[in-house]
C-alpha cells in the first residue's frame, strides 16, 4: 500500500512538472515576412555598389535588436578574408516595423558566394534568423554596368507648387543591348517603394519619364530629359499619358522622385531616389 502511494505521488509530480513546462514553454518568436535580399530579392550584391535590404517584422513583444551578417562559407576559397556585420538600433523597441536599409558593399569585399543572415531578437529572449546564399560580384566582370547620373533635377526636399515644372535631365552610362527606364513621382501616402522597374505599380505613380532602348553598343550612354508641370491632368506615360486621378492624383505633401533602370538583356538594375515636396 505504501509503495502504491509512493508511485502515485511520483506520477503526480511528473504530471505537474509536465504541465508547468507546457505553461512556460518557449517564448514566441518574431515574425519576418516580405524579405528582400538585394533589389527584387535577387540575392545579388556588387562590390562598391549600393545594396538593398527590406523585411517586415512583427515582434512577439518588442524588438531588442536586429541586423545582418555576411560571412564567408567554410571550405570555400576566397581571395581574402572578409565579413560584414551590421546592427540597426533605430528599430529597438518597435512592435511592428519595416526594416528598409541601404548600405554599400565595401571595395575590399572579395567576389564569391556568401552566407547572408538577418536576425531579429525579441525582448522576451527569443530570436528569429533568416538565412540565404548571397552572390557578391565585381562589376568589372559584368557585360553592363548601368549608372544613373543626374545632370539637372530637383534638389532634396525641393518644394514644387501648382503650375511649376518638375524638370529632369540625366545620363545612364555603361549600357549595352536592350533596356528600359522609368522616372516616377510617388506620394509617401501610397506606401509604395519600388527599386526595380518590375516592382513599379503605375496605378500608384505619376510617370515623369518612360524610355526604352534596343541594340545599343557596349558602354553606350543614354541621355534622358523630361518635364511635367505640377498639377497636370495627365503624366508622361507612353504613348498618350495616364490620367492623374484616383490613386495617381496629385496630393499635398512628400513625394519621392524614383529613377529606375532595367537592362532586359543582361538582367542588371540601377536605382536612385530624391525626396521632394508638393504644394497644390
Image (cartoon, helix red, strand yellow):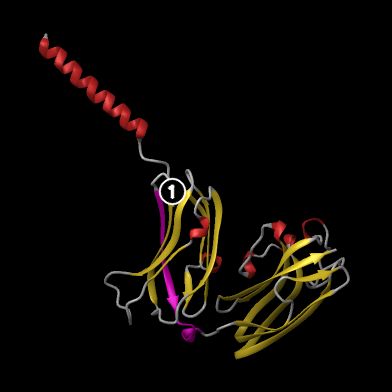
Q: Quadrant of the C terminus?
A: bottom right
Principal SS element in the magenta part?
strand
Q: Residue at x 40, y 78 (%)?
A: 109
What residue is drawn where x is 38% and y is 72%?
Answer: 113
Q: Is residue 130 magenta?
A: yes
On the picture, is 173 further left or further right than 53? right
Hey, which residue is sitting farthest top in the picture? 1
Q: Where is residue 90 shown, x and y percent of the image?
A: 52, 59
In the rendered structure, the answer to whether residue 24 lies left or right of residue 96 reads: left
Foreground pick, 168 / 199: 168
Q: Is-magenta flag for residue 56?
A: no
Q: Position of residue 132 (x, y in %)?
A: 41, 62
Which quadrant is the N terminus positioned in?
A: top left
In x, y percent, where is residue 169?
Answer: 74, 83
Q: Quick check: 27 above or below 132?
A: above
Q: Is residue 178 above or below residue 208?
A: below
- Helix, strand or loop under label 1: strand
Residue located 81% across and 60% down the image: 249
Highlighted magenta segment, given as a residue range: 127-142
Residue 185, percent from left and from top: 74, 68
Tell me where residue 279 sits by quadrant. bottom right
**Pointer 1: what residue?**
122
Amino acid at each position: 500500500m505504501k509503495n502504491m502511494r509512493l508511485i502515485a505521488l511520483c506520477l503526480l509530480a511528473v504530471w505537474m512538472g509536465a504541465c508547468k513546462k507546457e505553461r512556460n514553454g518557449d517564448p514566441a518568436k518574431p515574425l519576418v515576412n516580405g524579405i528582400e535580399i538585394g533589389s527584387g530579392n535577387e540575392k545579388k550584391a556588387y562590390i562598391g555598389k549600393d545594396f538593398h535590404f527590406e523585411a517586415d517584422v512583427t515582434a512577439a513583444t518588442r524588438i531588442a535588436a536586429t541586423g545582418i551578417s555576411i560571412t564567408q562559407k567554410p571550405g570555400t576559397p576566397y581571395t581574402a578574408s572578409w565579413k560584414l556585420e551590421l546592427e540597426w538600433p533605430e528599430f529597438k523597441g518597435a512592435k511592428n516595423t519595416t526594416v528598409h536599409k541601404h548600405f554599400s558593399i565595401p571595395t575590399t569585399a572579395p567576389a564569391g558566394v556568401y552566407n547572408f543572415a538577418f536576425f531579429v531578437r525579441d525582448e522576451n529572449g527569443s530570436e528569429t534568423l533568416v538565412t540565404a546564399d548571397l552572390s557578391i560580384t565585381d562589376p568589372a566582370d559584368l557585360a553592363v554596368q548601368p549608372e544613373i547620373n543626374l545632370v539637372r533635377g530637383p534638389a532634396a526636399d525641393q518644394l514644387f507648387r501648382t503650375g511649376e515644372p518638375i524638370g529632369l535631365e540625366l545620363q545612364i552610362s555603361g549600357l549595352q543591348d536592350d533596356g528600359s527606364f522609368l522616372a516616377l513621382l510617388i506620394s509617401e501616402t501610397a506606401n509604395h517603394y519600388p527599386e526595380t522597374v518590375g516592382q513599379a505599380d503605375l496605378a500608384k505613380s505619376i510617370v515623369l519619364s518612360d524610355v526604352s532602348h534596343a541594340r545599343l553598343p557596349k558602354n553606350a550612354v543614354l541621355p534622358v530629359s523630361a518635364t511635367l508641370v505640377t498639377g497636370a491632368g495627365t503624366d508622361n506615360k507612353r504613348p498618350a499619358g495616364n490620367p492623374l486621378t484616383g490613386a495617381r492624383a496629385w496630393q499635398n505633401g512628400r513625394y519621392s522622385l524614383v529613377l529606375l533602370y532595367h537592362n532586359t538583356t543582361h538582367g542588371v538594375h540601377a536605382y536612385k531616389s530624391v525626396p521632394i515636396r508638393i504644394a497644390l
